[in-house]
Image (spheres, rainbow, N blue to C red):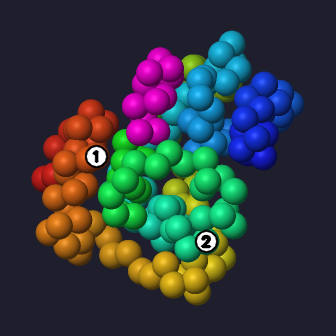
């Protein structure tokens, strides 16, 4: 699918997507289509707190230009300008603005990992039976993180330990999207 998108073959990428059958997650690939793929297929967005997502993106090598050509999906990420950290912030916010423009219902990941009414609503949107019990809360791709650390991507502290500059950039770039999905986020 990503190879087709890189070649500008949006129809071919949509065909690959349609053949995948019922899918639980293909993000962030879907937002990289120029328009909503498979418009008759139910789609929901899962938003994760931008502070954690940006940190994860930094650790996973988002916008790491030294090796960008080796990670074909990252070549599809839009270029925004600014520092690598600022690009990660912009990409996070851009993804949810794009999903919103497609009128895709968006649910907070933190609200669906536990058995909640939000999870029931999400299941209703995609026409599946609600799943009982708690869901896994962590992407365990530690090998990917280690690979990028070995390439010199470095470490990224958790939000409370970000520099004043990074906190300010995040607030400016991602603050409106955080306010929408995580009201009061700056107090937590």
Q: Residue at x 27, y 66 (%)?
A: 159
Residue 19 location (% of width, % of height): 86, 31
Any part of residue 21 in sight: no
**Disc 1 versus disc 2: nearer the observer:** 2
Query: Which quarter shows the N terminus?
Result: top right
Q: Residue at x 47, y 18 (%)?
A: 103
| Residue 149 can be seen, yes or no | yes
Query: What x and y, as percent, mark residue 21?
Result: 82, 31
Does the magenta portion include 4?
no
Q: CA distance from mark 1 to mark 2?
A: 25 Å
Please state the horizontal and vertical placement of residue 161, each as a whole percent of the image: 23, 75
Specify start and end residues of the magenta stretch as a single range.
94-105
- Residue occupied by mark 2: 67
Residue 30 shown left or right of residue 95 in the figure: right
134 or 24, which is in the foreground? 24
Other-residue count near label 1 (Cα within 10 Å), few / some / many at <14 / 14–19 / ≥20 = many
Q: Main secondary structure of the magenta part?
A: helix
Q: Pick whichever of labels 1 and 2 is earlier in the sequence.
A: 2
Residue 17 location (% of width, % of height): 78, 32
Q: Name the one closer to the observer, 73 or 8.
A: 8
Give the vertical position of 75 relative to 99 (above or below).
below
- The kind of secondary structure element at disc 1 is helix
Q: Nearer the viewer, residue 115 or 2?
A: 2
Q: Which residue carries the number 1 mark?
A: 174
Q: Is residue 65 left or right of residue 58?
A: right
At horizontal 14% and vertical 69% (from top left) the residue drawn is: 164
**Farthest residue in the right direction?**
19
The kind of secondary structure element at disc 2 is loop
Rendered position, 23 above or below 42: below
For image coordinates 37% across by 42% down, the residue present is 93
Quadrant assignment for the C terminus:
bottom left
Q: Is residue 87 left or right of residue 188?
A: right
């Amino acid at each position: 699918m990503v190879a087709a998108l890189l070649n500008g073959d949006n129809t071919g990428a949509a065909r690959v997507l349609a053949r995948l059958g019922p899918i639980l997650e293909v993000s962030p690939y879907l937002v990289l289509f120029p328009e909503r793929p498979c418009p008759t297929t139910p789609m929901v967005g899962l938003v994760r707190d931008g502070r954690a997502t940006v940190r994860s993106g930094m650790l996973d090598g988002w916008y790491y230009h030294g090796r960008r050509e080796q990670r074909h999906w990252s070549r599809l990420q839009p270029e925004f300008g600014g520092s690598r950290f600022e690009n990660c912030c912009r990409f996070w916010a851009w993804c949810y603005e794009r999903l919103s423009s497609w009128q895709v219902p968006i649910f907070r990941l933190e609200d669906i990992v536990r058995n909640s009414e939000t999870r029931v609503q999400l299941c209703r949107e995609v026409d599946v039976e609600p799943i009982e019990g708690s869901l896994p809360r962590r992407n365990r791709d530690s090998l990917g993180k280690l690979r990028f650390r070995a390439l010199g991507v470095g470490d990224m502290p958790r939000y409370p330990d970000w520099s004043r500059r990074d906190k300010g950039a995040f607030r400016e770039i991602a603050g409106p999207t955080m306010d929408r999905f995580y009201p009061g986020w700056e107090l937590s």
